[in-house]
Every structure is written in C-alpha cells, then in structure tokens.
Image: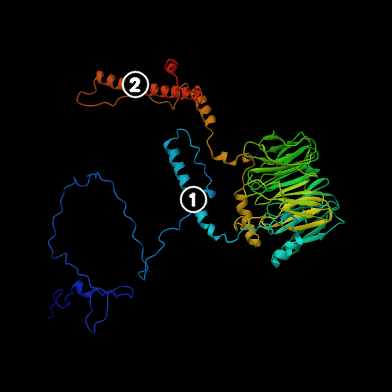
C-alpha cells in the first residue's frame, strides 16, 4: 500500500537570500575601491550587509515631545552639490547663465512703482504670482537674446564726410549682391502717380496708380501676384491681415480684392474714401472720406463698428499709432486729433501748425509724432502725456509725406526730393539738424513707407515706384511666430486662425493700453459708497470689538468692559498719532525754503 509522502520531505532546502542574489556588474566609470583577487573578474566593491533578522531590534520610544520641539536657531539652507556627469567630470558653469539687469528691464512690462492701495490678501497674493511670472518671462526673453544673430546696419562716411552726399549708386556698389538687388526703379509714368503699401511680413508690395493701375508682387523675388486695371481712380491701397487680401479705395466706393485680382467685396457704405489704415490686432480697417467721416470696418465679420463725424471738413491726412491703435487725423485748421472707435469725440486735440496739416507720422514705440504743415514747418511732438514739440525745423519746401522706420528714422518727401533724418536710437526722437540721406527722384513724391525687417524705403511718385537702400532703418531680427516672411501657405492659414482667436475688441482702444490692467480706485470707492447708501449700512465696515468669553471667572461684566475700553483707547491713540503726523507734514510744507530759524517759531501754531 503506497503512502503519501510528507509535505516538504523531497523539496530541496532553500538557499540563503544573501547567497542567491546576483552580483551587480561594475561599470567602467566606477572606481575600484578594494583590490580584487588574482584571476577574479573585476566588479563593484562588495557592501557589507547586516542580517537584520538575527539582530535584536530595539524597542521604539514613544516620547512624542521631540516631535513638537521648535529649534531657536534659523534653519540654514544647504548649498546644492555640484552635479557630476557619468565620466565624473564637474560642470565648470553650473546653474543657469547670468543675465544682465538692463536687458531684463528692457523686456519687463509691469510697472512696480504703482501699488494698489490697501489690497486684500487674496488680491495681493494674485499680484505677487503675476509679478513672479512676468519676471520669469522677462528673464527667459533676455536669455534668448543670444539667438538674435543679426545686427542693425549703419552708414558712416570717411573723415568729415557728410553721409547725405552719398548717392544710392555708391551704396549699391558697396553692399553685397543680395542687398544690391533690393534697389530698383519701376518706370510707370502712364498710370502714375502711385500709392504703395508693404505687407506686415515685409515680403509683398502692393501699389495703385491714380489712373486705375493696381498690382501686387513679391518684391524680393520680383514675382508678380496680380495686375489689374480697375478703370477708376485709385486713391489709396492697403494689405489686410495677410497678403491674400487687398483693400483699394477707388473713386466711389471701397473694394476688396484677393491676391489673384478677383473682386470679393464692394463696401458701398464707405464712399469717397481718401485714406486707408489697417489695425492688425483688432482686424479693423479705418477709412477717412471727403465727407469728413472716420469709419471703422471689422473685416473679420464684415460689420461697421463705428462711423464718427470729425466735423473738420475733408479728411486727407491720416495715420495710426502702432503702439495703441489710435488714429491720428490732420485738419486744415492746423490741429491733429486722436480718435478711438469707443468715443464719439476726439481723445486729444493738438494745435501743431499755423496753417493746414499736410502729413502726420507716428513711430513704432508710440512716443513721438512728426507733423508737417503749410507753414513749411517740420515738428516732432512728445506723445507721452505732454503733447509738446520736442524739435522743429523750417524746410525750404513743405513736406507732403512723412514715414517712420522701425528703428526711428524719419523720411520726408518734399517735391521730388526725399530726406531722411536719424536719431540716437530706437526710442529717441530723430535729430532734424543734419539729414542722414538725401535722394532725388524722377517725379513728385505721392507715397512713402519703410519696408518691415528690411533696410528699404519704398517711394511712390508720378514716374512709378522706387526702392531705396537705407542702412539701419529696420529691425534685423523678426519673430517667426508673428511676422515670418518665409512662411508657407499652411503656416499662414494657422496664423490667421490664432490671430482671429486673439483678436482685441475695438472697445479697448485707448491712449494708454496699460491702463486696462489697472484697478479704477475712484470708481471702486464710488461703487462702495452707492452700495452703502442702498443697503442703509456699510457691509465692508469694521465690526465693533467683541471680547471672547473666558473661563474661571474671567468673563465678568467688569472685565469685559475693561477690555473693550482698552481697545477703544488704543484706536483713539492711533488716530491722534496720525493727526499729529499730518500736522507736522503740513508745517514742513508751509515753511519757506532757506529761511533762518527764529526764537519766535515756538509761538506759531
């Protein structure tokens, strides 16, 4: 009779865990600390392991007093250990690269000098988080400035040579072949005079003649996109948000064309238009007409946002401020008015000239405005709240057209001559004492514009189109996500979708765009006052002091009254201290400066 074997009788005995564990192979970068036996394969040093099962474990102490012990000494932060690579070498430049404070300040957009009076705890914490994020963004932008490899150009003459005497032919001979190809002349006398406009990327050029000639081309490769004749006078021409759409102000109405020359829209509510301006971040097309109306057309939905009557007669001088999207209009009485679609009246009126205003231009920073009038005066105004002239110059012939470049150069067209003045930098006003460049054309000037991201000035005149080389006029580096001249069709379509999603409402156009992020303290206080009057009491008022109840007979009526009186006395002392400080400040302001002290001053109240 077979018997069942006992469990575990034929099972082999288990080996010790320490013996069955595999050895960890030694890597080539690990240094050998202990000598290896002869003939044995080198490996990592063995670590002595203790058998915790055999050792008697000590009982844990249940003393909980140590957990709540507070150290009186401040906790010192340990310096981070330098990280080593696999080879064991230490990084000589550990941590992030240092950034200059001046460069970080250039990209900072938060003004820390303005503080919110008496903010709540939650509001204060949000402001601290926003400031920290803004500071981190500024540091990243300053650190990525190393990737901007291009530098702005400049033009320098020889010892004592005037740069205004340098001709375009001399500049073309001195530059490389690619830059020399950017200088050209289009002889189109039979359809002139011409108005021109560059796209935001600076790659495409559109121009229209007074006799109906309209054309658009890639001026870098000289590839023609479209060319038509509208059989009607063309007064102005503008690219819309991309080079695929074109707005043309014809004799009667406003027409929209695509890049193939096909007419898409005819806006009959905008009639007898003289000047056009497109606001790219708001998708607004601003038109000035002979009837004296300033009209804003939203091209994303095809709706007229506002139609404002300037009440100043015919409007033929108009430009935009690229910093805050405010429209500047020049009038025949010598004034320049600033307009926003949210207001039916002008934001500011500036008296600039004794005669009519002929041309207006605003630089890219929004700080300076240049105007020219019938009194042959060329003036530069400060737009940072003072609206006062910074410099003025009398020209032998009044400037009929003005244009600012991206780096602050000012171009003025006077008859058939174009003068260019330069300043000390991008944010500084141009110096009107000595011209930077001078060029004579084959016809009278009718349009000026600097090409974005290229040292090129496009001039439309009665003889055609001229492309001038102006060293140091444009920004050398462009933002590939915003204005990429080398983008494909798919990239342009994706950019249009993102731009439409980020469109700024027309109601937010104002003189100071940074004021939109601030708190209107006056309106807030007025709202609180109206709320208190409506409810009959102030819900935000400080509640009267109520002492907390205590035990063991310390909450008697006498002790409660004593504590209330103590708090009231403290508040009374604080009020008296504040009033005394205010009186001292008033006395210090009332004292005449430089007066000798007198013994009778102690009797003065």
Q: Residues within 10 Å of mark 2 (few under 14, many from 20)?
A: few
445 with respect to 148 (left or right) = right
Residue 456 visible in rendering: yes
Residue 181 visible in rendering: no
Q: Residues within 10 Å of mark 1 (few under 14, many from 20)?
A: few
Give the image location of residue 90, x and y in percent. Answer: 37, 66
Q: Are marks 2 and 1 in contact (CB under 8 Å)?
A: no
**Label drawn at residue 219:** none
Q: Closer to the camera: disc 2 or disc 1?
A: 1
Q: At numbered mark 1, what does the secondary structure look like: helix, strand or loop?
A: helix
Q: Quadrant of the C terminus?
A: top left
Indicate whether 417 appears above or below 558: below
Q: At numbered mark 2, what does the secondary structure look like: helix, strand or loop?
A: helix
441 with respect to 541 (left or right) = right
Residue 561 figure quarter: top left
Q: Nearer the viewer, residue 433 or 67?
A: 433
Number of numbered discs visible in the structure rendering? 2
Q: Furthest-right residue in view?
A: 190
Label 2: which residue?
Answer: 568
Label 1: which residue?
Answer: 101
Q: Furthest-top residue in view?
A: 603
Indicate whether 133 appears above or below 16: above
Question: Along the polypeptide, which appears first: circle 2 or circle 1?
Answer: 1
Indicate whether 418 appears above or below 147: above
Q: Quadrant of the N terminus?
A: bottom left
Residue 356 figure quarter: top right
Q: Residue at x 58, y 61 (%)?
A: 149
331 with respect to 534 (left or right) = right
Q: Nearer the viewer, residue 112 or 62?
A: 112
20 with respect to 200 (left or right) = left
Give the image location of residue 437, x and y in percent. Answer: 73, 54
Alpha carbons under labels 2 and 1: distance apart: 49 Å
């Amino acid at each position: 009779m077979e018997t069942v074997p006992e469990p575990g009788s034929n099972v082999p005995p288990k080996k010790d865990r320490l013996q069955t564990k595999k050895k960890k192979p030694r890597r080539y970068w690990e240094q050998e600390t202990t000598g290896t036996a002869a003939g044995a394969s080198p490996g990592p040093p063995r670590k002595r392991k203790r058998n915790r099962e055999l050792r008697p474990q000590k009982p844990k102490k249940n003393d909980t007093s140590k957990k709540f012990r507070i150290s009186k000494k401040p906790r010192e932060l340990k310096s981070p250990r330098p990280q080593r690579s696999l080879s064991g070498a230490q990084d000589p430049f550990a941590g992030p690269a240092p950034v200059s404070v001046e460069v970080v300040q250039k990209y900072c957009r938060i003004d820390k000098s303005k503080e919110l009076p008496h903010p709540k705890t939650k509001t204060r914490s949000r402001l601290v988080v926003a400031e920290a994020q803004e500071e981190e963004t500024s540091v990243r932008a300053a650190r990525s400035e190393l990737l901007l490899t291009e530098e702005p150009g400049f033009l320098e003459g020889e010892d004592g040579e005037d740069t205004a005497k340098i001709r375009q032919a001399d500049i073309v001979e001195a530059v490389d072949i690619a830059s020399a190809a950017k200088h050209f002349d289009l002889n189109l006398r039979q359809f002139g005079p011409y108005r021109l406009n560059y796209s935001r990327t600076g790659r495409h050029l559109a121009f229209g003649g007074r006799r109906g000639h309209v054309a658009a081309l890639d001026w870098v490769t000289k590839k023609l996109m479209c060319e038509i004749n509208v059989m009607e006078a063309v007064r102005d021409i503008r690219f819309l948000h991309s080079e695929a759409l074109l707005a043309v102000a014809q004799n009667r109405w406003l027409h929209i064309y695509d890049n193939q020359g096909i007419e898409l829209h005819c806006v009959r509510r905008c009639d007898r238009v003289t000047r056009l301006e497109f606001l790219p971040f708001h998708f607004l097309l601003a038109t000035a007409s002979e009837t004296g109306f300033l009209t804003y057309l939203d091209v994303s939905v095809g709706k007229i946002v506002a139609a404002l009557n300037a009440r100043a007669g015919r409007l033929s001088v108009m430009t935009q401020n690229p910093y805050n999207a405010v429209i500047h209009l020049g009038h025949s009485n010598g004034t320049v008015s600033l307009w926003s679609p949210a207001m039916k009246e002008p934001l500011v009126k500036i008296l600039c000239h004794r005669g009519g205003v002929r041309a207006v231009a605003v630089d890219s920073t929004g700080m300076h405005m240049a105007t020219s009038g019938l009194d042959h005066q060329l003036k530069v105004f400060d737009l940072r709240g003072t609206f006062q002239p910074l410099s003025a110059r009398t020209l032998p012939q009044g400037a009929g057209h003005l244009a600012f470049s991206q780096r602050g150069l000012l171009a003025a067209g006077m008859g058939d001559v174009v003068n260019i003045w330069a300043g000390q930098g991008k944010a500084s006003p141009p110096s009107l004492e000595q011209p930077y460049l001078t060029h004579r054309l084959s016809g009278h000037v009718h349009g000026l514009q600097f090409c974005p991201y290229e040292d090129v000035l496009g001039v439309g005149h009665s003889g055609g189109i001229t492309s001038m080389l102006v060293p140091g006029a444009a920004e050398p580096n462009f933002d590939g996500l915003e204005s990429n001249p080398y983008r494909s069709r798919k990239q342009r379509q994706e950019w249009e979708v993102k731009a439409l999603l980020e469109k700024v409402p027309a109601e937010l156009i104002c003189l100071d765009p940074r004021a939109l992020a601030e708190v209107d303290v006056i309106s807030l206080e007025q709202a609180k006052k109206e709320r208190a009057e409506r409810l009959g009491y102030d819900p935000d008022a400080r509640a009267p002091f109520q002492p907390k109840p205590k035990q063991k007979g310390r909450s008697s009526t006498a002790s409660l009254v004593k504590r209330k009186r103590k708090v009231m006395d403290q508040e009374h002392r604080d009020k008296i201290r504040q009033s005394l400080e205010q009186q001292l400040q008033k006395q210090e302001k009332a004292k005449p400066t430089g007066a000798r002290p007198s013994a009778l001053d102690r009797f003065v109240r």
